[in-house]
Amino acid sequence: MQQRTGGSLLVEIQPFLVITDQDYILLDAGLGYRNEDGVLQIHQHLINNGVNPMDITKVLMSHLHKDHSGGISVVDPVSGQRSLSFPHATYYVNAQEMQYALDNDGKSYLAEDVRILKERDNVVFTEGNGVIDGYITYEITGGHCPYHQTFLIDTGDDKIFFGGDEAPQVSYLKRRFAAKYDYDGKKGMELREQFKERGTRDGWTFLYYHDSKVPFGKFQ
């Protein structure tokens, strides 16, 4: 998926599906756009690749900026009722990020897309760092936005790292810089250095949410 911002900047957006022995894991939820038939694009992409959207078991959210969270929920065009886009999944969202999104509704956050998370019982609000089901580690990072979190999925055969917008493109790992649009650019820069070191040492497969040319790979 692609989005133009400010009339000139083209942003590439790609949520990821990781299939393990236990789960169908969606990493971030995209923009929430529909195709010409009225089907959510993210649902159609899954269907095109042989996956029933209703089979998603976990939705891991790095943060709730609208380009990552627009696909969390959907409004029925007939009834006008809003529901979760993946009703059989458990959503994992940082608790402080949830409140921050509601308190800062506007340019980066759209409260109407994510408020439903507070109303459903299949949502786990994470705090700090932790582990999900013994093989998914989440860490609070706070570089791109105050309560951003990253995920490391250890399948036994591979370690898959999703940095969200802390490491959105492979070029961010190759160059040392502080991004002005990050909440804490210096911290974001330092985090990427840590990711490079840890990922190279432990053989991580990096997933890049905003990089369609190099969507994933090991960092050499």
Image (tube, rainbow, N blue to C red):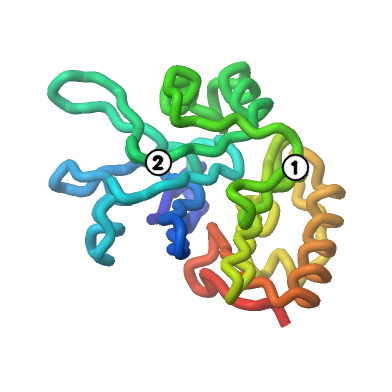
> Circle 1 sits in a helix, a strand or a loop, which is it?
loop
Label ID, residue 89: 2
Give 2 or 148, whichever is nearer the viewer.
148
Q: Secondary structure at mark 2?
A: loop
Label 2 is placed on what type of residue? Ala
Q: Earlier in the sequence, mark 1 or mark 2?
A: 2
Residue 181 shows up from this direction: no
Horizontal side of residue 17 vs 95, given as left or right: left
Q: Farthest bottom residue?
A: 220
Q: Is residue 44 visible?
A: yes
What x and y, as percent, mark residue 165? 64, 51
Instruction: Check the picture and name the quadrant holding the C terminus.
Output: bottom right
Residue at 67% from the left image edge and 58% from the top image edge: 167
Q: Residues within 10 Å of mark 2 (few under 14, many from 20)?
A: many
**Foreground: 54 or 195?**
54
In the image, what residue occupies the spot 43% across and 59% down? 17
- How packed mark 1 is, by other alpha carbons closer than 10 Å (few <14, some 14-19, many 20 or more), is some
Residue at 50% from the left image edge and 52% from the top image edge: 27
Q: Tell me: 103 left or right of 25.
A: right
Q: Calculate the distance from the C-alpha at mark 1 to the C-alpha at mark 2.
A: 21 Å
Judging depth in this view, the residue of 68 and 16 nearest the camera is: 16
Q: Is residue 119 left or right of residue 144?
A: left
Q: Is residue 101 above or below residue 170?
A: above
Q: Amino acid at mark 1?
A: Asn
Q: Residue 162, percent across and down?
A: 61, 58
Question: In which quadrant is the N terminus drawn?
Answer: bottom left
What percent of the width, then of the height, locates residue 78? 13, 23
- On residue 10, the disc is none
- According to the picture, the residue beneath numbered tag 1 turns out to be 129
